[in-house]
Image (cartoon, helix red, strand yellow):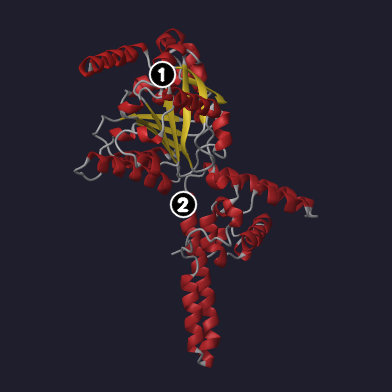
Amino acid sequence: MTLSSLESYGINFQVKVIASLLTNKEFLNNVHDVLDEEHFSNQAHKWVLKEILSYYHKYHTTPTIEVLKIELKKLDNDVLKVSIKEQLKEAYEASTEAKDLEYVQKEFSKFCKNQNLKGALLSSVDLLKLGDYDSIRTLIDNALRSGQDKTIGHEYTKDVETRYRDEDRAPIPFPWPKFNEVTQGGYGKGDLVLIFGNPGGGKSWAIVDMAAYAASLGYNIVYYALELGESYVGKRFDANLTKIPVDRLPDHRDKVEEVINSLPGTIIIKEYAPKRASLDTIEQHLKKLKSLYDFVPDAIFIDYLDLLKTRKPRKERKDEIDDVFTDAKGLAKELKIPIISPSQINRAGAKDDVLEADKIAGSYDKIMIGDISLSLSRKRKDKLNGTGRWHFMKNRFGPDGMTFSSKIDTSIGKIEIMDNISEEMEMMESQKANNSIGYGNVDEDEKYALRKKFFELEGKNG
């Protein structure tokens, strides 16, 4: 059952319908064939609907606010202009603040379908007198199909405008401009971002820096801690945002509260014991946030994915790891939210200046699953000097193979990316290779061992 007219639903309902048509391409795609401006009594709504349909038929997506502003300037009626501006303002506010848009969209779809079916039945009266039963069947079938889900995927020839829209991937920036330059703005919807490094190298601090920066821009964050406790992770965020080292935070509570109370975004930290939670557990937690608090995160940070248990037991450890990382990528795509996680390297990479993909611990297939895979190399001297080298192992959105130097302050988790040192590293590697041909690359202990072996062999041959 639906109400007899759209006016019966009230003006707020109509505003939310317009909001959905302006911002939800999938909804517009499903109902565009049953939309009728005569359903709306408000002249401003009629104008907006007409522009939405005109733009959709040409570009197969929703119009941007810039398009509507230009079309609005072409109007001669100043009174109508003011009304349209007001209704557009209310619609865009509703698109971000209304909590019942899903219900509005379903109810409006049913309303349009019922209106089409009524029209088909009325038209069938004349066809019935003529005995044109085939036309009656066609009318009724078309009315029943109206408003159904028409999403078949990305239609290559029709969706050119969609794939070049900035908001299609909607990247969240890294705190580091140089990384944004090579990833088309950061990490976006459905991306799996992996940060590899050795134990105690600063990977977890790096994702705290990323999450805190995103929250400072107004994004909502969920941070799952499987290694550290919720309270301590919270203190890491405090340190990062206030620039006060963790061990000195108790003496600066006023500063902490001042900074976090002015934070535009929201950070939720949830702790789980290692190997006690799975991605199913995380999904249930996300559903609870949605149902109880209407909270939907813009990005999910999991510290670490390796510490989640698999949904189904597997015999081989590698298969378990592959399942977790593949499922994480699937969850990111399904929710259209980026997932970011650190991961370990193996022992062989502990002494490397630059960590390559062959040093990944557990399963090499992680590199295949991730969209952006970074490594952070910090040897003993780096930890003392507060430095490190970042390397792009994989980058679906730009070049990879680049290595950047960085300054890292692990007392507050702030990271500064410096220059691209890829060329310098190549020269060093080349120099090493050349030196290894001669005697200059052998240290004193090795020289002593070689001399000893030489004299032993000389003695035997003599």
Q: Is residue 41 visible?
A: no
Q: Quadrant of residue 176?
A: top right
Where is residue 114 shown, x and y percent of the image? 49, 68
Q: Is residue 16 above or below residue 264?
A: below
Q: Nearer the viewer, residue 387 or 280?
A: 387
Q: Nearer the viewer, residue 84 or 430?
A: 430
Q: Is label 2 in a helix, a strand or a loop? A: helix
Q: Nearer the viewer, residue 49 or 448?
A: 448
Q: Quadrant of residue 192?
A: top left
Q: The C terminus appears in which quarter of the rendering? A: top left
Could you tell whether 304 is left or right of 147 in the image?
left
Seen at 52% across and 23% down, the residue is 405
Task: Give the crowd class for mark 2: few <14, some 14-19, many >=20 residues within 10 Å.
Answer: few
Seen at 60% across and 56% down, the residue is 160
Could you tell whether 84 is left or right of 110 in the image?
right
Q: Is residue 47 above or below residue 433?
A: below
Q: In the drawing, what numbered circle is on residue 28?
A: none
Could you tell whether 382 is left or right of 345 in the image?
right
Residue that label 1 marks: 439
Q: For marks 1 and 2, give the CA distance.
A: 72 Å
Q: Is residue 63 above or below residue 310?
A: below
**Which amino acid does the dot numbered 1 rest on?**
Tyr
Residue that label 2 marks: 102
- Labelled pair 1, 2 in contact (Cβ < 8 Å): no
Q: The N terminus appears in which quarter of the rendering? A: bottom left
